[in-house]
């Protein structure tokens, strides 16, 4: 399936963010991609069903590694990781009958490229539980250079000393610039550095950023 | 001067969109302020200098706390310190500090227009922390942050979901020494830009000589206004600027324009009381009212740090691609009663 317009695929499902969903989506569209330009999808990598299957598998892997899910919390990275984190939590509740706390984290203030590109917070961080002694599973949409995850690790340290931090991503596209590796992966997707991957609960698209 | 250098010199340079951007940015810093470790590394390696040629502890400490919570380094310059006493001009002082590698100056001065001048002299961002009777933009912005929180709570919404449209039609009474108040000028600009209806309540002697171009209504009767006001914003009598000669007695002022408990109860349900501080209990506000839940004075102060973090991050943090600062040739042009480039000593008239 080839899609020509980003508007048709970039709809964040309402309810996940509360009434602010549309607003968050609007801001996300404004801020992504970071250097400006328009994302033009070239093809679909994963369908809606594929994304759901991958998230279900990741949820099972998390449950398998942490029997009973005691002390496990999910933290979605703003904004792409947030709907994925909520989806994993709902699968965990269905399968294991355990309500895993979900937080959201914006890493804008911890980035090492402030001043190199527009870095503005996309949404407010919301971690309403104590991280001390917890197993934190960071959830993000795409793992690329690893710099967002590095920033997230710094940010998490300010909220408390987690017992362990794991990383779950929907797409690992390679090109790491830091020694960071994911624990749970939806799909390994070899890409060119200039390509762009768009992840939502509706599917995964591979495309390019076209500067205007 | 680099074309991309940003400043915060006047609310008039921001417009409604700029105010909204800063309010949204401050949401994230309010969250940071609530953490166990309220510090982020966002401005590591940047230096913020506070250049205060007029006494102020609260505003200076608020800016310095904000800078430190962003991991910036802080330099403090007091007017009373050696160099000005030895006769160094403000320009030399600013340029000397700039030569040490300052990224942002926070400037307070008793003359209107000094921050604009400093912005012309140095190659760094400049924040106006109060200049004469001209403006005090961060005070107006932190009050907007506080009001937006209150409006969101009133509607039972998360503050992030509350846009500035909530300010539309909000009735605000600014009461007291408007003549000498830079806070009032910034407040009028910010609130009217967001669509609020502002009424100035003061005796004629405490109003500016001309209100031409001010988007406000004027009243001399506090009791009449309070019944239909959502926000009562009280100003301190600026005795150090000659206010004493403009009111017969403190008691008389307090009787006609002070907010006492009886007056506070006559306000509509949900109406709030604000004050930029320092509060003089028993004069513009009675002690009882200052401690009422509807008085937001403490909350204004704690939001002050978050808002100032937002301002410093906005100036120094993000890349300026596509984010335009004010045009230096146009600065002050949008301000009612603008004095342009001239430095006007306050209270000198």
Image: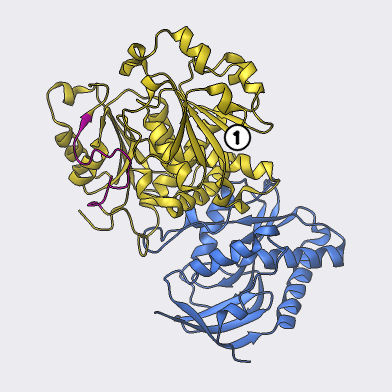
Q: Residue at x 83, y 62 (%)?
A: A93
Disc 1 chain ID: B
Q: Is B306 placed above or below B180 here? A: below
Q: Chain A: what color?
A: blue
Residue A58 on image: x %, y %:
73, 72
The answer, for residue B345, to whether it is visible in the render is: yes
Towards the viewer: A184 or B111: B111
Residue located 35% across and 15% down the image: B246
Q: Could you say which quadrant of the image residue A165 lies in? A: bottom right
Residue extent of the magenta highlight: B328-344
Identify the residue at horizontal 61%, vertical 20% (top origin).
B263
A112 and B193: which is toward the camera: B193
Q: Is residue A210 above or below residue A106?
A: below
- A114 or A185, which is in the foreground? A114
Q: Main secondary structure of the magenta part?
A: loop
Identify the colour scheme used.
by chain
Q: Nearer the viewer, residue A169 or B56?
A: B56
x, y percentage for residue A203? 66, 80
Does the magenta-highlighted stretch encompass residue B330? yes
Is disc 1 placed on a helix, strand or loop?
A: loop
Q: Is residue B288 magenta?
A: no
Q: Pointer 1: residues within 10 angstroms few (<14), some, or many (20+)?
A: some
Residue A79 visible? The answer is no
Quarter holding the C terminus of chain B is top left
Read off the residue under disc 1. B230
Name the spot of residue B69 as percent of width and height, x first. 46, 40
B98 in relation to B131, above or below: below
| Residue, far left | B87
Colour of chain B, in one word, is yellow
């Amino acid at each position: 399936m080839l899609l020509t317009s980003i508007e048709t695929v970039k709809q964040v499902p309402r309810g996940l963010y509360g009434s602010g969903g549309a607003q968050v989506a609007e801001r996300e569209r404004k801020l992504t991609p970071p250097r400006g330009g328009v994302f033009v999808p070239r093809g679909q990598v994963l369908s809606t069903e594929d994304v759901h299957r991958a998230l279900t598998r990741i949820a099972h892997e998390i449950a398998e590694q942490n029997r009973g899910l005691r002390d496990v919390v999910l933290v979605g990275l703003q904004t792409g990781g947030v709907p994925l984190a909520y989806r994993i939590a709902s699968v965990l509740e269905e399968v294991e009958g355990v309500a895993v706390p979900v937080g959201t984290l914006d890493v804008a203030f911890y980035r090492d490229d402030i001043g190199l590109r527009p870095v503005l917070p996309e949404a407010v961080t919301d971690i309403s539980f104590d991280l001390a002694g917890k197993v934190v599973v960071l959830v993000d949409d795409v793992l690329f250079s690893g710099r967002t995850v590095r920033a997230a690790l710094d940010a998490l340290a300010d909220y408390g000393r987690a017992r362990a931090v794991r990383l779950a991503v929907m797409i690992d596209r390679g090109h790491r610039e830091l020694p960071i590796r994911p624990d749970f992966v939806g799909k390994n997707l070899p890409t060119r550095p200039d390509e762009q991957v768009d992840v939502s609960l509706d599917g995964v698209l591979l495309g390019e950023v076209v500067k205007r | 001067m680099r074309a991309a250098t940003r400043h915060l010199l006047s609310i008039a340079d921001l417009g409604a969109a700029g105010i909204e951007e800063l309010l949204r940015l401050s949401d994230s810093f309010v969250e940071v302020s609530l953490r166990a470790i309220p510090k982020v590394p966002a401005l590591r390696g940047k230096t913020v200098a506070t250049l205060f040629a007029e006494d102020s502890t609260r505003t200076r400490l608020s800016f310095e706390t904000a800078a430190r919570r962003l991991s910036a380094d802080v330099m403090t310059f007091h007017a009373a310190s050696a160099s000005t006493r030895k006769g160094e001009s403000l320009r030399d002082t600013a340029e000397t500090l700039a030569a040490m590698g300052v990224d942002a100056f926070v400037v307070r001065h008793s003359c209107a227009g000094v921050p604009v001048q400093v912005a012309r002299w140095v190659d760094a961002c400049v924040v106006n922390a109060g200049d004469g009777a001209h403006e005090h933009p961060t005070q107006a912005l932190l009050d907007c942050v506080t009001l937006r929180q209150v409006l969101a709570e009133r509607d039972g919404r998360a503050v992030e979901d509350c846009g500035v449209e909530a300010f539309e039609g909000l009735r605000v009474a600014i009461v007291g020494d408007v003549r000498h108040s830079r806070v009032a000028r910034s407040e009028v600009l910010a609130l009217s830009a967001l669509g609020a209806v502002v009424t100035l309540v003061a005796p004629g002697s405490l109003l500016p000589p001309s209100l031409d171009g001010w988007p406000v209504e004027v009243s001399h009767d506090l009791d009449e206004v309070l019944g239909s006001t959502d926000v009562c914003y009280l100003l301190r009598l600026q005795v150090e600027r000659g206010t004493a000669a403009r009111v017969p007695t403190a008691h008389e002022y307090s009787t006609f324009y002070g907010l006492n408990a009886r007056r506070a109860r006559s306000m509509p349900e949900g109406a709030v009381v604000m004050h930029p501080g320092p509060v003089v209990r028993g004069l513009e506000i009675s002690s009882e009212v200052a401690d009422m839940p509807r008085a937001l004075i403490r909350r204004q102060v704690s939001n002050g740090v978050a808002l100032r973090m937002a301002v410093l991050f906005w100036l120094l943090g993000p890349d300026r691609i596509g984010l335009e600062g004010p045009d230096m040739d146009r600065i002050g042009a949008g301000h009612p009663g603008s004095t342009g480039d001239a430095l006007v000593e306050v209270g000198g008239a």
